[in-house]
Image: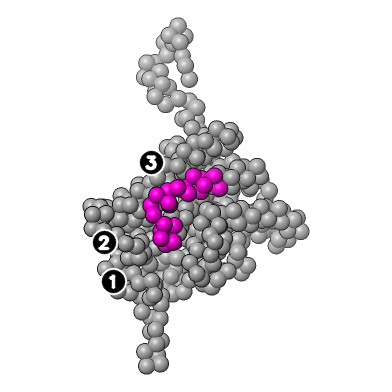
Amino acid sequence: MVLSVSKLGNFPLVLVLLLIVFPISTAAKSKCDFPAIFNFGDSNSDTGGLSAAFGQAGPPAGETYFGSPAGRYSDGRLVIDFIAESLGLPHLSAFLDALGSNFSYGANFATAGSTIRPQNTTLHQSGFSPISLNVQFYEFNDFHRRSQIIRSKGNVFSQLMPKEKHFSHGLYTFDIGQNDLTAGYFLNMTTDQVRAYVPDLMDQFTTVIKDIYDQGGRYFWIHNTGSVGCLPYILDRLQITAAQIDKAGCASPFNKVAQYFNTKLKEAVFQLRKDLPLAALTYVDVYSAKYELISHANKHGFEHPLQACCGHGGKYNYNMKHGCGSKIKVKGKEIMLGKSCKDPSVRINWDGVHYTEAANRWVFEKIVNGSYSDPPLPLNMACHKQ
């Protein structure tokens, strides 16, 4: 708002200054009313997709909050669960889960092991999901069309499917890219080779955003990728020299690649704002939040930041052959080898790859107010543009 001196008259000076510092256009913004969430991603936000397709993530997964396995690779809730709760919505049902699902408040298309670009391998060969981001969009496209056909049948069908307006008023959340980076390293690529295909990842990512926009999606909440060089499965499985370890104990080369990915992702989001004028796109720097947690774990009430809570042996309590929940037979009796630690609430890493509920809650509480976002708007204001 601009006021000329001639028009100020007796207008109180304090109010004038307030209007300059806090423009009416910003102050008048109301909280968003998101009726649904449509999520795309990997295991950081998978609420049951991979489990539905390839078998449930077994005990002790889910022990902290759900009391039993709940399709999540954690002891409890994920960041996406806290996002849903904060918006007054139920936890998201996985699109692939045919049992007990309710899609009236959205759907989750994420699966553990997912990548942005399709991997030329199988889940059992590499651990990466065949449900890459483009496949997740195909599922969404089918869901959008068929859910309205099903909803039109009335009765119970209308209670389990989202309204058409939810697709234009809902929040579209993304947390994907970590596996694209680690996939290259596990194929023995160099850092330069991994960096070289990041632009292609951005092209494929932006294509999906534009496709959703074409179907009416307007509000996008996009997480960058975390500090992969601080994860036990990276520290244990990949060759790292002492000189490559930073002050937090993390592997610098892999974190630098993640930062490069994030730089390109932020540039892609900026370009999307120009290409999609009706969209509100929020870029969320979860990397910085996660690295802050790991590098100052004791300060934030956590311990052993680089060790898995649930695992078996080794410097990082991570063993690829005997992971979280793994069992062996001793004298004909089955015993659990990959046990949970005594107190997951003070641990950051759950199983060598994923975070505990406590760490997920901490990260959520840091990002929900917009302090790690661009534009710096809180989650409940993410329907507004800068």
Crowding at mark 1 (Cα within 10 Å: few <14, some 14-19, many 20+): few
What is the magenta segment's predominant secondary structure? helix
The disc labelled 2 sits on which kind of residue?
Glu
Q: Of marks 2 and 3, which one's residue comes earlier in the chain? A: 2
User: Residue placed farthest to the right in the image?
Assistant: 153
Which dot marks residue 303? 2
Q: Is residue 186 above or below residue 373?
A: below
The quadrant holding residue 357 is bottom left
Q: Is residue 381 left or right of residue 146?
A: left
Mark closer to the observer (1, 3): 1
Residue 289 appearing in the image: no
Which dot marks residue 314? 1
Q: How far apart are marks 1 and 3 (CA)?
A: 37 Å
SS of the residue under disc 2? loop
Q: Which of 1 and 191 is in front in this view?
A: 191
SS of the residue under disc 1? loop
Which dot marks residue 371? 3
Q: How far apart are marks 1 and 2 (CA)?
A: 17 Å
Q: Of marks 1 and 2, which one's residue comes earlier in the chain? A: 2
Is there CB contact under 8 Å for labels 1 and 3? no
The quadrant holding residue 216 is top right
Q: Which of 88 and 340 is in front in this view?
A: 340
Residue 97 % position (x, y):
60, 66
Labels in figure, total: 3
SS of the residue under disc 3? loop
The colour mode here is: one colour
Mark closer to the observer (1, 2): 1
Residue drawn where x is 38% and y is 80% of the image: 336
The disc labelled 3 sits on which kind of residue?
Ser
Task: Tell me if residue 282 is in the magenta stretch.
Answer: no
Q: In this picture, which residue range is highlighted in magenta? A: 184-204
User: Residue placed farthest to the top in the image?
Assistant: 6
